[in-house]
Image (cartoon, helix red, strand yellow):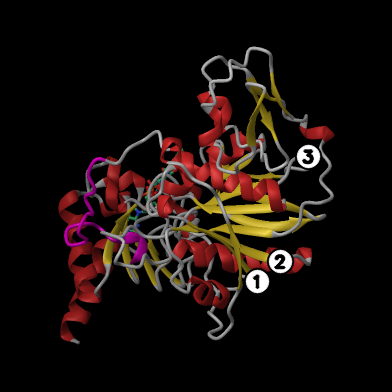
Amino acid sequence: MIEVSKKCIGCSKCVPVCPFAAINMIDKMAVMNEACTLCGVCVQVCPVQAITITREEASARDLSGFKGVWVYVELSEAADKTHPKKIKQVTFELLSAGRRLADELGEDLCAIMLADKNHNYEKELGAYGADKVYMVEHDELFEYNTDIFTTVIVSLVTRHKPSVMLYGATIQGRDLAPRVASSLYVGLTADCTALAIKDGLLLQSRPAFGGNIMADILAPKSRPQMSTVRPNVMKMSEPVHGRSAVVVRESAKLDKSLRRVKVLERKIAHEGGAVKIDTARIVVSGGRGMKSKEKFKMLEELSKLLGGVVGASRAAVDLGFKEKAHQVGQSGTTVSPKLYLSFGISGAVQHIVGMKASDIIIAVNKDASAPIFNVAKYGIVGDVHEIVPKLIEALKKK
Ligand SMILES: Cc1cc2nc3c(=O)[nH]c(=O)nc-3n(C[C@H](O)[C@H](O)[C@H](O)COP(=O)(O)OP(=O)(O)OC[C@H]3O[C@@H](n4cnc5c(N)ncnc54)[C@H](O)[C@@H]3O)c2cc1C
């Protein structure tokens, strides 16, 4: 519920900032109309704190009208407006997971797209399973901005009431999802590693207590049930080309004054020097068992011969064998290459969560009971210092 108290001085500052034209000045008092989505922008600008929003207790909310699985579409950066932005892969991964959830619930899978212009995105989004695309096109949505994107998403959620909403656990998703959750007074489970439906609710699994246990989280009293999922965690389904999603155009009146952060300069990093471990098709990883920085270098040679990228366990990073950017796992990068080779890595749960989605895992460890063998398709019990040089020699001969 939104209320304007007698403290209102009739300054009208709330009127232009309301994205939904929901405020009229009547007798020098702000009066909200039915277009109000409780987004809270007016509360922020009121100089005399005359506007208050009271949220219902979660337990008192009527959850019956909440339907549909929503996926937030994340776009790549573009140098300027003439270059169409690309949809990031994590969106397709979430749509693939969302499709399973929506089918189980018997509800629609919807993609939520905020952009300055639609470049036929519904074709790609439909191919990965979206039934509908809620499309908000506006010049102000050219680049991501926390305040503006939160306002638009909160309004869409308030209007359409989805039951589940998924975001990538990316820099953008990690900024946006908590802001939306707090604006809507709902919970958020970050960095989920598995999603399923249990008794009609979203079962959100994620590592807890330093990764030593897996926690299963349900949100029975609030909607939407919201989760973030890291890139490379959910398997991407095969796209069905020719299957397009229905576009539902939504309007939003966005004013520059909503934007509290100004971008002064844009610098796009060139991929040349950066480690692209998250998108590599082959990852050759080493752990403490490699023994030293010098010996770890063998993996660089092996990786080069295979056309891959070097990964490392946290122990290997802590020992200085490799830089942090190469760390695979819960506090490093999640990878899902076609081939993951593991040398001298025990397979602690915090490492496994970062690589178990790889297509083929081959592990070498001198301890036959090492947990890495539980996720490996092929395992060699042996000494890495004998096996790696032999592999290098064999590949060189080829
Ligand atoms: C909050 C938190 C977050 C974490 N995040 C991550 C993360 O992102 N990534 C990560 O990797 N870890 C992470 N860890 C640490 C994790 O718990 C383990 O400590 C770490 O993965 C162990 O690395 P390792 O397997 O290289 O070393 P160890 O566990 O010491 O294993 C070394 C393995 O090498 C084998 N070995 C030794 N010599 C040889 C040889 N000559 N030939 C063959 N095999 C040999 C041994 O049998 C052993 O299995 C995290 C921990 C916490 C608490």
Q: Amino acid at mark 2?
A: Asp
Q: Is residue 380 magenta?
A: no
Residue 132: name its quadrant: bottom right
What is the chief secondary structure element of the magenta stretch? Answer: loop
Name the disc covering residue 108, or none: 2
Residue at mark 1 to residue at mark 3: CA–CA distance = 27 Å
Q: Residue furthest front?
A: 27
Q: For the residues carrying marks 1 and 3, which lies nearer the camera in this image?
A: 1
Q: Amino acid at mark 3?
A: Lys
Q: Is residue 276 magenta?
A: yes
Residue at mark 2 to residue at mark 1: CA–CA distance = 6 Å
Q: Position of residue 65 (x, y in %)?
A: 81, 51
Asked if the residue at tag 1 contacts the one at tag 2, i.e. Cβ–Cβ closer than 8 Å, the answer is yes
Q: For the residues carrying marks 2 and 3, which lies nearer the camera in this image?
A: 2
Q: Earlier in the sequence, mark 2 or mark 3?
A: 2
The residue where tag 1 is placed is 131
Asked whether residue 319 is in view, the answer is yes
Q: Position of residue 245 (x, y in %)?
A: 60, 74
Q: Camera-side residue: 164 or 377?
A: 164
Q: Secondary structure at mark 3?
A: loop
Indicate left or right for 273 with 17 as reference: left
Disc 1: residue Cβ within 8 A of ligand 1's nearest atom: no
Q: Secondary structure at mark 1?
A: loop
Q: Earlier in the sequence, mark 2 or mark 1?
A: 2
Q: Amino acid at mark 1?
A: Asp
Residue stretch rendered in magenta on the structure: 264-279
Indicate left or right for 112 with 59 as reference: left
The residue where tag 3 is placed is 221
